[in-house]
Amino acid sequence: MLASSRRFYRAFDRLTTVLDPARHDRRARLPQHQADTLATAWEDDDPAHARKRELLQDIATALVLTPVRWAKGRGYLRHFRGDVGIDTTAAPVFARPPRTRRSTGELIASTEITAGLHHLAGNGPPEYDCSATLTVAARTHPALGSFPQLALALVLDTPHKRIGANAITTLKPLATLGLPAAFAAVDRAYTDQAADHFARPARELGYRLALDYKVDQRGVQGSVHGALLIDGSPACPLMPDRLAQASSGLDDAAIRTPSQELTALIAAREPYLLRLKQSPNADGTVRFQCPAAGTSPSVTCPRFDRLHQRGPSRPAPVDLTDARQRAAHPAAKPRVLPPQPDLKTDQLPKICRQHTITVRKDDLGHLDKFRQDLAYLSPAWIGTYKPVRANTEGINGRLKGHDLDLGDPKNRLAHGRVAQTILAALLIAVANDHFLDQWRHTHEPQDEPVTLAGTPQTPVATFDGAPLAGQSRPPPTP
């Protein structure tokens, strides 16, 4: 037994040495300036360092995805629509933070040179740890079918660094696995990232965004081609100010539990929002249509009628018992009120002079990070954002409530970013395996043969109630 343990530790040491771009004695507390120099190897542009970092990430991704591949091959993810939640959770390390040596006054680094202070939500003191960025499979409605909620990817990094880039790193492997892409719901830490770091790359991967905002980011956020950007949605520039500013200055408590008045104001915004005319193309260009244009306008606008020479429609009989006919009648739609006298044609914004506007990825500039694909606080947004966030927090809690607790540093005693990444990935892989086992015993009949996805006529195994472990599992399908 002792010989086997020594062989394991020697092999693990060789592995961490090969993958570490800045190998050093991880049992000694170095002077802080030396530790800072070594830590730059995890962030610089050196090709050799980058190659080792990428290889380490590939290993971590492969470990986390192993149970996911197996679940997909067995058809357990057939109801997964592609909705994911992304969040960063603390992964405490078994090391003390930097301190000043009393005898000399010298600043001494931690044995975990790439860890840092993680400022948690609330007023609690920061913790010294690494940050684990996790992407989880989420379900927005029970009627869509059941599937196991799993952690799909992991990136371990220094707290509060590369938040957006790490999120994109977790999303990229999912496409190679053949998983669909739908909505990605994230908290305000990701909304605050530069558009090129998170929002645009996420859209390029096929994801639509469901975002939340800080207090000072709510309400009117800017404009594009004359259209207002209101809580991430382009809208008519003549939307009543009371509706446009409905969420301005509201604190988080008012957003989490909207009042009836706020709910009514959010619903009244909808007719004024620009409608999607054409989904993003390869370069991210999107076309939006004026709400007064088209065959089924949602508002009536004298300015639009004047500019586009739309005459009054002929009166048509309306069946007052038919709700659809009543709603389609111009008298039932909100009426846009231009200023009197109105602006000259050449002074009007582009959205008023045209039926549609084309929004390219650079048109909004830094405001593009706020744009999202559902109207903020609308029933559709609430029905997507809140369940995904609940699933995300639930997975974080389960990972830290599992027997191999991700939040307990004693389960990851080895020092160094390489060792911490590999051990964290192993813990998540084991937890995913446990989640799959629980889900199977809850949702799969115990007396029916299980078939691989794509080959429903060929039974490959029969569940006998035993845990999913060892050689009882067939290899996953690609």
Image (cartoon, rainbow, N blue to C red):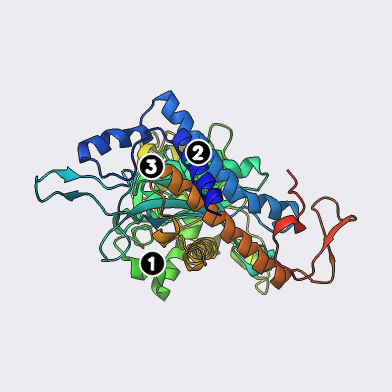
Of callouts 2 and 3, which one flags the residue occurring earlier in the amino acid sequence? 2
Q: Residues within 10 Å of mark 3 (few under 14, many from 20)?
A: some
The N terminus - image quarter: bottom right
What amino acid type is highlighted by mark number 1? Ile
Give the percent coordinates (x, y) of residue 423. 49, 51
Circle 3 sits in a helix, a strand or a loop, which is it?
loop
Give the percent coordinates (x, y) of residue 231. 40, 54
The C terminus - image quarter: top right
Q: Quadrant of residue 83?
A: bottom right
What amino acid type is highlighted by mark number 2? Leu
Of callouts 1 and 2, which one flags the residue occurring earlier in the amino acid sequence? 2
Residue 115 in sight here: yes
Circle 1 sits in a helix, a strand or a loop, which is it?
helix
Give the percent coordinates (x, y) of residue 204. 54, 38
What amino acid type is highlighted by mark number 3? Arg
2 and 3 marks in contact (CB < 8 Å): no
Residue 227 in sight here: no
In the rendered image, which residue does mark 1 sit on? 255
Circle 2 sits in a helix, a strand or a loop, which is it?
helix
- Marks 1 and 3, Cα distance to the nearest angstrom? 28 Å
Circle nearer the viewer, 2 or 3: 2
Q: Is residue 205 above or below residue 390?
A: above
Residue 162 marker: 3
Which residue is the extreme one toward the right?
Answer: 457
Q: Report whether 217 appears left or right of 316.
A: left
